[in-house]
Amino acid sequence: MSTDAASKLVTQGYQQIQPIIHQAFWHQKGISQNAAMKQKQVKKEVEIKRRMTIFELAEAMGKDTDHVYEALLHTNIDMDSLDDDFVLDENWIKEIIKKSGMKFRWAKLSEEKVKENKDAVKRPPADPAILVSRSPVVTIMGHVDHGKTTLLDSLRKTQVAAMEAGGITQHIGAFLVHLPSGEKITFLDTPGHAAFSTMRARGANVTDIVILVVAADDGVKKQTIESIQHAKKSNVPIILAINKCDKPEADHENVKKGLLADDVICEEYGGDVQAINISALKGENLMALVEATVALSEMLELKADCTGPVEGIIIECRNDKGKGPVTTAIIQRGTLRKGCILVAGKSWAKVRLMFDENNKPMNVAGPSTPVEVVGWKELPSAGDEILEVESEQRAREVLEWRSYVEAQEKIKQDLEVIEAKRRAHLEAYKKEQESFNTLNWRQRKSAKYKANKHLMATRPKEKSEMDKYTLPIIVKGDVDGSVEAILNILDDYNADEQCNLQVIHFGIGDVSENDVESAETFSGLVYGFNVNANKVVQQMATKKGIKIKLFKVIYQLIEDLKDELSAKLPPSIEENIKGEASVLALFHVTVGKKEVAVAGCRVQKGQLHRKLKFKLIRNGHILWKGSLTSLRHVKDDVTVVKAGMECGLSLDNDIDIKLGDEIICYEEKEIQQKISWDPGF
């Protein structure tokens, strides 16, 4: 075959297969381009909600929380306020996802129906025709140690006061007293100590009559005035019992006059307050007080509905080793029986047992009756309202609703705080950006990098241990009211600039092993009020080096707490001046190859001691503090130079000494600081 023929054949063959090659090439190229474009377009899709925590967002993105923190560095958010539970708003969530090269889609919101109010409420007022007379509830109030419990003791013929720590009532006592005349009165004995203001307020809110006890030898005091205010706020009538009238220094007229300033006007001064002079300790004139109370209750025409579901109020609550959670309550409506289903706060009970104040079993408790109730699933709070419901299921519905309402309220409060912080951070961010306007781009980058580096270094999760000027404590008490009183005092703590006080846990009952472990975790200590710590717990605490401090009197506990806070403070340095000298002459001496300045002085007061510290004063200003390198009298090296003697001395620093300068010799002494917090008693 000739060359031309072969070439022609090849050309024809190429022309035949060229369309096939061309088509295959562009097909493959199209696949590659489409795949690349498709790969480029695929971004991870993150399902988001309007508000998410940092932890929730990191989990949705498939990242750790550090990734979210880093993405937030260039926003106007305050990094110091962040932790994993911090709630991010919609704008921040979108910004983080965008910076992470992802896209978002909104989570499908399930249309939540408006929850039906399942709460238990009081019944409407009863028909007056079915009301029956009831016993009065009388609260004994007044200043500490004015004889309130002794008065009630005399009425009950028991030794209540003798059993109380320090003779001070430390929680509300509720007692039903049967009088010789046949009447019954429910008495509430409230604490008079300054620490128990909330208990007194609670006592006044459930009472019909207040007996205000004032000591004739002590007069009107702070808690007396506070008790009057509680009674007036609750619109409760007052009977004045002027106690300790048997004492020689008693002045009952001074008490009556002292109460005029607080609008408590006795009958002899034209008012409506009955005043009875008594001696609770000797039992003098107590029947007159009782008769006045009964007469006032008859005038008030106290009546109640004994039928239908029970209503009442919790006066006190505690954890009992044998009985479990126990509440002391006053029944206000209906009749309480075993088996009743009760709700109070966020707890409920099926009444298993009922006891009176003498621990005797009861079968029924009607209006105005104080009763101990056993059967609570959890311990409610003092002051909670008791309502009877028809079944356990209904009780659970009530608690679920109350928990829901509380959660919604907390969310609302949290969002308000977040919004306020967001606005504040936005303002700070704007100011920070304005400060960068005068810088060139390179300076701006450097300044922002340094700022962001600082913020990352101070993230909460990487912060150092608690400051050493912090005292974490655990508070345990015998009853809810005692713990409440202690916490109310601690709420007024105002010395955080000296030492930070942290209540890391509080509860009712004896000190437990968990309390010791918590104290060890936070390097704190445990305070117990009217509770115990068994031998195992004490041994565990000793082994771990944890202090357990148990008290029976509240002001002793607070005084000890003040001592512990003071012990955390660094000692202050106090200067005690030992001697004063005046510079009368200046000269120089050669020591080796060095010329040393020497001040010729006369000791004016005290003495100069070479081993102590010195300072140089000129025109009232301290120019130098330090030590002496030499102290001589005539030609001898000496340790001490006394008043009236002359000496030559040189300082440990090259100071320009002038005639007339003062040389002060002093001793430094460490003094333990005292915490500035004053709890008010």
Image (tube, rainbow, N blue to C red):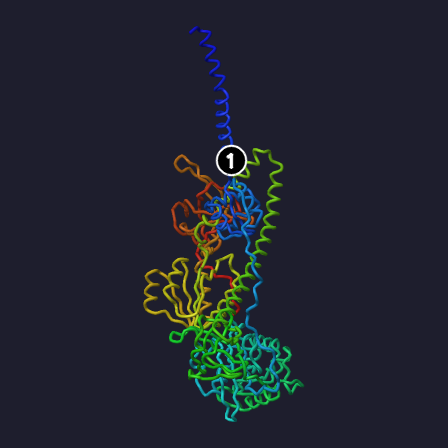
- Tell me the element at label 1: helix
- Location of the N terminus (image quadrant): top left
Percent x, y for residue 328?
47, 77
Q: Nearer the viewer, residue 470 or 258?
A: 470
Relative to 233, 520 lies left or right: left
Q: Nearer the viewer, residue 123 or 533?
A: 123
Percent x, y for residue 79?
52, 47
Q: Is residue 644 above or below residue 491?
A: above
Percent x, y for residue 534?
34, 69
Residue at (46, 8) in percent of width and height: 5
Query: Could you tell me how many numbered marks the image carries?
Result: 1
Percent x, y for residue 90?
57, 49
Q: Is residue 217 visible?
A: no
Q: Nearer the viewer, residue 360 or 187?
A: 360
Q: Which residue is mark 1?
A: 38
Q: Nearer the viewer, residue 7 or 400?
A: 7
